[in-house]
């Protein structure tokens, strides 16, 4: 299995304002009906990937992140750190059963490692 990019995430200081911007500009559906109140973005197209919007922390920057699906989040984190990456958020289970971790690559670009619930 390759490691596909499964989702984008927009981090924004004003997440609700940014969600309304993309909803108005592109007609993207924004749904917050989930355990974290995460702004799930459905673009309305079978092409491309879907995403989400999350507030950036006060000390953070607004940015776009990619989430890459892996078979083993803990092993991928270990490999990333061996290659010069830095762990921002260690592997953890999310309320919906997915597993994720956040990494900085050697250039300081953040990305997510992701394993959907139920994946063996």
Image: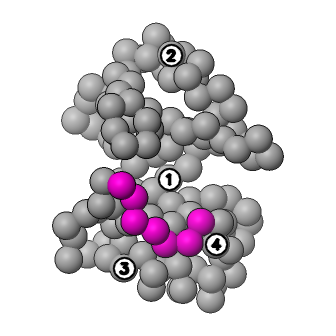
Q: Which residue is mark 3?
A: 72
**How far, Cα to Cα, is label 2 from label 4?**
31 Å
Q: Residues within 10 Å of mark 3 (few under 14, many from 20)?
A: some
Q: Earlier in the sequence, mark 3 or mark 4?
A: 3
Label disc, if present, on residue 87 of the rendered structure: 4
Disc 1: which residue: 66
Q: Is residue 96 magenta?
A: no
- In space, the residues marked 3 and 4 are separated at their CA atoms by 15 Å
At x 59%, y 18%, the residue is 17
User: In percent of the image, x 51 and y 61: which residue is there?
Assistant: 112
> At x 36% / y 55%, what residue is drawn?
95
Disc 1 to disc 4: CB gap under 8 Å: no
Asked which secondary structure carries label 4, the reply is: strand
First reached walking from the N terminus: tag 2 or tag 3: 2
Residue 94 on the magenta span? yes
45 relative position to 63: left or right: left
Task: In the rendered structure, find residue 20 and report the number of the disc placed on it.
Answer: 2
Disc 2 versus disc 1: nearer the observer: 2
Q: Secondary structure at mark 1?
A: strand
Write down the region rendered in magenta: 89-95
Disc on the earlier residue, 3 or 1:
1
- Name the secondary structure under disc 3: loop
Indicate the position of residue 39 as horizontal and vertical percent values. Answer: 44, 33
Marks 2/3: CA–CA distance: 35 Å
In this view, the residue in front, 18 or 94, is 94
* Visible residue check, residue 60: yes
């Amino acid at each position: 299995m390759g490691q596909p990019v499964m989702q984008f995430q927009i981090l924004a200081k004003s997440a609700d304002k940014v969600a309304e911007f993309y909803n108005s500009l592109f007609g993207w559906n924004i749904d917050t009906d989930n355990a974290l109140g995460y702004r799930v973005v459905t673009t309305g197209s079978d092409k491309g990937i879907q995403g989400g919007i999350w507030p950036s922390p006060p000390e953070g920057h607004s940015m776009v992140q990619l989430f890459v699906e892996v078979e083993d989040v803990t092993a991928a984190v270990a490999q990333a750190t061996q290659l010069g990456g830095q762990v921002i958020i260690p592997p953890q289970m999310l309320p919906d059963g997915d597993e994720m971790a956040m990494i900085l690559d050697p250039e300081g670009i953040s990305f997510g490692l992701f394993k959907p619930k139920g994946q063996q």
